[in-house]
């Protein structure tokens, strides 16, 4: 699991490096483009994901105590918060789409190079992160079903712990995406 998580960090780390290079080259344009993102939604999503990390941690703690009901409840809340994150992100992307800002759009191609790069990186990086959220939700659903059936229990909860590690990585990546895109001005 740690090797897999390391490869995920390498993937996002490379994207963070690409972002940093382009931000240095197009500081003003990145600043202008970032001003059009909704900081309130970005910060709200951060709160949602950090809370989901807490509920994930509580799920692992509950299974260690042998409390299957609390484990399932906290997994449900983790899934609910993950879904909330995606709904908020969908509203945010929808607003960009309604303004003609989406990958391959004519409006995006008409923007100055730096602004176009900013939005391109924004869609790639937040989209890839959103994909990881969906994968995490699928994994957490499988884990919850195994907890419910008794296949994950106090004596054997490695899959739950590994799902938690993955989920914390997803949250950690967002903590880096927030300042890159939403807090740059």
Image (cartoon, rainbow, N blue to C red):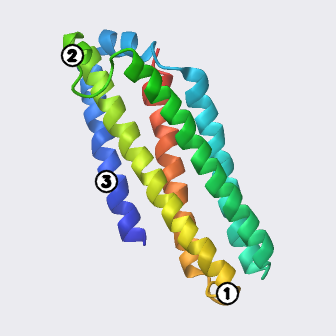
Mark yes or no: residue 45 visible: yes
Which residue position is annotated with label 1? 150
Please indicate whether residue 140 sits to the left or right of residue 47 in the image.
left
Q: Image point 70% across, 67% down: which residue?
A: 59
- Of badges 3 and 1, nearer the viewer stands 1
Please indicate whether residue 40 sits to the left or right of residue 35 in the image.
right
Q: Which mark is residue 10?
A: 3
Q: Quadrant of the N terminus?
A: bottom left
User: Does 158 appear above or below 82?
Assistant: below
- Of badges 2 and 1, nearer the viewer stands 2
Q: Which mark is residue 106?
A: 2
Q: CA distance from mark 3 to mark 1?
A: 35 Å
User: Does 77 appear above or below 148?
Assistant: above
Q: CA distance from mark 2 to mark 1?
A: 53 Å
How many discs mark residues in the rendered view?
Answer: 3
Which sits in the foreground, 155 or 28?
Answer: 155
Counting other residues with Cα less than 10 Å from the Cα at mark 1, is it few (<14), some (14-19), or many (20 or more)? few
Secondary-structure class at tag 2: helix
Please indicate whether residue 134 sits to the left or right of residue 149 in the image.
left
């Amino acid at each position: 699991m740690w090797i897999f998580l390391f490869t995920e960090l390498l993937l996002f780390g490379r994207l963070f490096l690409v972002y940093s290079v382009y931000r240095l080259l197009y500081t003003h344009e990145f600043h202008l483009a970032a001003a059009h993102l909704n900081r309130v939604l970005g910060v709200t999503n951060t709160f949602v994901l950090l809370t989901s990390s807490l509920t994930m941690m509580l799920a692992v703690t509950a299974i260690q105590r042998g409390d299957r009901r609390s484990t399932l409840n906290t997994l449900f809340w983790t899934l609910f918060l993950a879904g909330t994150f995606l709904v908020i992100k969908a509203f945010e992307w929808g607003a960009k789409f309604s303004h003609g800002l989406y990958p391959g759009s004519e409006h995006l191609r008409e923007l100055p190079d730096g602004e176009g790069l900013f939005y391109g990186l924004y869609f790639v990086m937040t989209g890839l992160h959103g994909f990881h959220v969906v994968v995490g939700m699928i994994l957490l659903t499988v884990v919850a079903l195994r907890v419910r059936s008794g296949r994950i229990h106090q004596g054997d909860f490695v899959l739950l712990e590994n799902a938690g590690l993955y989920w914390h990585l997803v949250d950690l990546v967002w903590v880096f995406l927030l300042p890159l895109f939403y807090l740059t001005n």
